[in-house]
Image: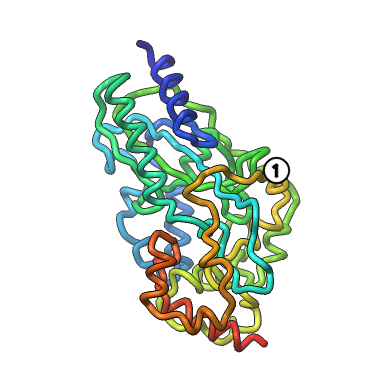
Amino acid sequence: MTNKKYTELIKSEAFRLGFDAYGIAKADFVEEHAVFLKNWLEKDYQAGMSYMNNHFEKRCDPTLLVENAKSVIVVALNYYPEKKQDEKLPQIAYYAYGNDYHPVIKGKLQQLLSYINGNIAPVSGRCFTDSAPVLERYWATQAGIGFIGKNNQLIIPQKGSYFFLGELIIDLPLEYDTPIEKNSCGRCSKCLDACPTKALEKPFCLNANNCISYLTIENKEDIDNRFYPILKNKLFGCDICQQVCPWNRFAKPHSNQEFYPNKLLLEKDSDEWLKMNNGEFLTIARNSPLMRTGLEKLQQTIRALDKTT
């Protein structure tokens, strides 16, 4: 078989596995983006996410993650929900409505890798999704899936930005898609204007120190009281910069059973969160992204929200 045929078979299998978008890029050293990343880290815009400082070389060179890597297969999986929380309740970001996406996407990518080994050619490869030093959005642009918007989100034309990303890096050369490098935000600045903490300091530049998603999820310290008046009812994450994005008028509800809303979590009010004990939390949140913070952090955030009124 030819590289073209290999590529067709891989994309066909990615479609069968339920991915909503997919593309393939040549595994090369990241040049321009490496400069941007270095400058971003030097400004400490990664806030308390010290792991972002680790493995800089691997982030910029996929051949250091997979020896003799030739191709980066990028996939996207929709998580946009059909039904959303009552706005009066403590808000959870859409991506966390259902089960943790990491095992879901990795499981599908492992199936894709097995398919390649069993039906195309023996390869060496590794699967990734937001848990290793891979510049996911960059590779998604190189694979022709979408472009990075001014809100730093990967935007898929005619589909929006509510997508999880995953990568399969292999040592098999394939046919590569045309990168999407041109910014398609035009003069729009709705995301920058809407960000309540001004974490989006300028187009394509996020200062995580001021980001509600960081403050309510990754931040290990108490939330600075200067943010209390603008947290409103954000309990876990924030979707504002995506909700106002005109491209998300194309967003359609997903059909992935693993991401269907967990009503036991989404219907809790502040009092119920504060009265919850660890046993109850583990029972209803065992497979949820909310496990990343744990109950104590969630309750600390609830108390901070209460101070906004």
Reading the image, the residue beneath label 1 is 250
Residue at the far top in the pictured view: 1
Instruction: Residue 174: name its quadrant.
Output: top left
Q: Residue at x 59, y 85 (%)?
A: 226
Q: Is residue 98 placed above or below 285 in the rendered structure? A: above
Number of marks: 1
Q: Residue at x 50, y 27 (%)?
A: 177
Camera-side residue of 212 and 100:
100
Quarter of the image with the C terminus in it: bottom right
Q: Position of residue 304 (x, y in %)?
A: 55, 84
Q: Is residue 50 placed above or below 178 in the rendered structure? A: below
Q: Residue at x 54, y 28 (%)?
A: 178
Residue 306 visible, this angle: yes
Q: How is the image coloured?
A: rainbow
Q: Position of residue 269 (x, y in %)?
A: 59, 77
Q: Position of residue 42 (x, y in %)?
A: 43, 65
Residue 207 visible, this angle: no
Q: Residue at x 67, y 67 (%)?
A: 86
Quarter of the image with the N terminus in it: top left
Instruction: Residue 49: name its quadrant.
Output: bottom left
Camera-side residue of 278 and 207:
278
Camera-side residue of 278 and 205:
278
